Image (cartoon, grey):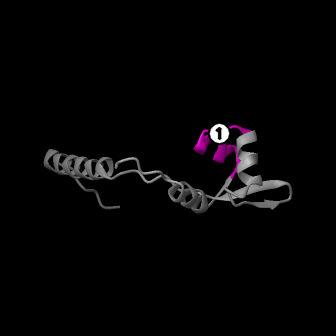
Amino acid sequence: MPTSIITSDDLREFKMELLEDLKELIQKPIQPKKKKYLKSAEVMEMLQVSPGTLQNLRINGTLPYSKIGGIIFYDADEITKVILENRIDNSQ
């Protein structure tokens, strides 16, 4: 088994490389993993609405949804689309 000697210069070089790698990681924006489908609780939190309001949005057709085995799912992209379509521009 060969033996290698680590010098203080090797350690300094390693430290500098490690610091550079850490700086790169810190500077990169963290992209949270976006879910494709959301459950009712997640949509209520996202939109800051009550269960009744969410139900009304479903009933009147504002928010499209799918129901599978008693669980209601919402497409996250569709929710974003509805929000953008209903945007009111008051900058006039």
Magenta region, residue range = 39-51
Residue 37 % position (x, y): 65, 59
Q: Secondary structure at mark 1?
A: loop
Outermost residue toward the front in this view: 92
* The magenta stretch spans residue 43: yes
Residue found at x 74% / y 53%: 58
Q: Spot the residue most to the left.
A: 9
Pick the residue in front: 15 or 62.
Answer: 62
Residue 36's place in the image compared with 51, above or below, is below
| 64 left or right of 87 in image | right
* Residue displayed at 76% across by 47% down: 55
Q: Residue furthest right?
A: 69
Indicate the quadrant containing the N terminus: top left, top right, bottom left or bottom right.
Answer: bottom left
Which residue position holds label 1? 49
Q: Is residue 54 left or right of residue 80?
A: right
Residue 20 versus residue 14: which sits nearer the camera?
Answer: 20
**Residue at 17% of width from left, 51% of height from top?**
13
